[in-house]
Image (tube, helix red, strand yellow):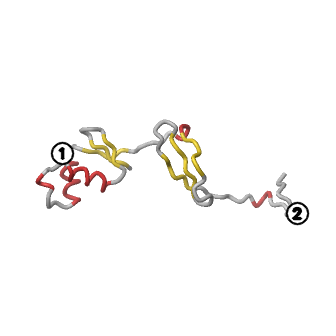
């Protein structure tokens, strides 16, 4: 879930990023207000909304192997943004073969 500031269409990745933005606008009523108050007040004023951001998987290209065990890094070809993609290994026990000292898996 991401947060969109409606006035500028700016997207914030986290609730805290949005709160920091709202505080930076200089509204004196927010000076001593709690984060929850700021979010609720600005939401009731229809200033922001939660949005679901979809990533075009067809537009991603492999960037680098990450740690090679738990994740890889892929890059959006249009925006240049990088994404951490968790990976998993699935063992196919039905295709088990005796190891003969060579890495020929055919």
Tell me the crowding category of disc 1: few under 14, some 14 to 19, or many 20 or more residues within 10 angstroms, Cα based. few
What residue would you read off at disc 1?
Answer: 45
Which residue is pictured at 49% across the width and 47% down the height?
Answer: 82
**Disc 1 element:** loop
Q: Residue 10: x percent and y percent? A: 31, 41
Distance (Cα) linking label 2 and label 1? 70 Å
Residue wearing tag 2: 100
Q: Which mark is residue 76?
A: none
Query: Of all residues shown, which one is farthest toward the right?
Result: 100
Residue visible at 51% across and 41% down?
Answer: 76
Of pointers 2 and 1, the one earlier in the residue sequence: 1
Q: Residue at x 19, y 57 (%)?
A: 37
Q: Residue at x 23, y 59 (%)?
A: 35
Residue 100 figure quarter: bottom right
Is 17 on the left-hand or right-hand side of 23?
A: right
Q: Are marks 2 and 1 in contact (CB under 8 Å)?
A: no
Task: Check the image and name the residue furthest to the left.
Answer: 28
Q: Position of residue 53 (x, y in %)?
A: 41, 43
Q: Is residue 30 left or right of residue 99?
A: left
Q: Position of residue 74 (x, y in %)?
A: 55, 47
């Amino acid at each position: 879930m991401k947060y969109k500031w409606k006035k500028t269409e700016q997207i914030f990745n986290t609730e805290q990023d949005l709160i920091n933005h709202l505080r930076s606008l200089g509204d004196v009523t927010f000076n001593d207000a709690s984060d929850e108050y700021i979010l609720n007040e600005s939401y009731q004023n229809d200033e922001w909304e939660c949005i679901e951001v979809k990533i075009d998987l067809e537009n991603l290209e492999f960037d680098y192997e990450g740690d090679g065990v738990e994740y890889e890094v892929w890059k959006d070809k249009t925006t240049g943004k990088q994404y951490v993609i968790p990976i998993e290994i699935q063992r196919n026990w039905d295709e088990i073969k005796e190891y003969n000292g060579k890495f020929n898996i055919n």
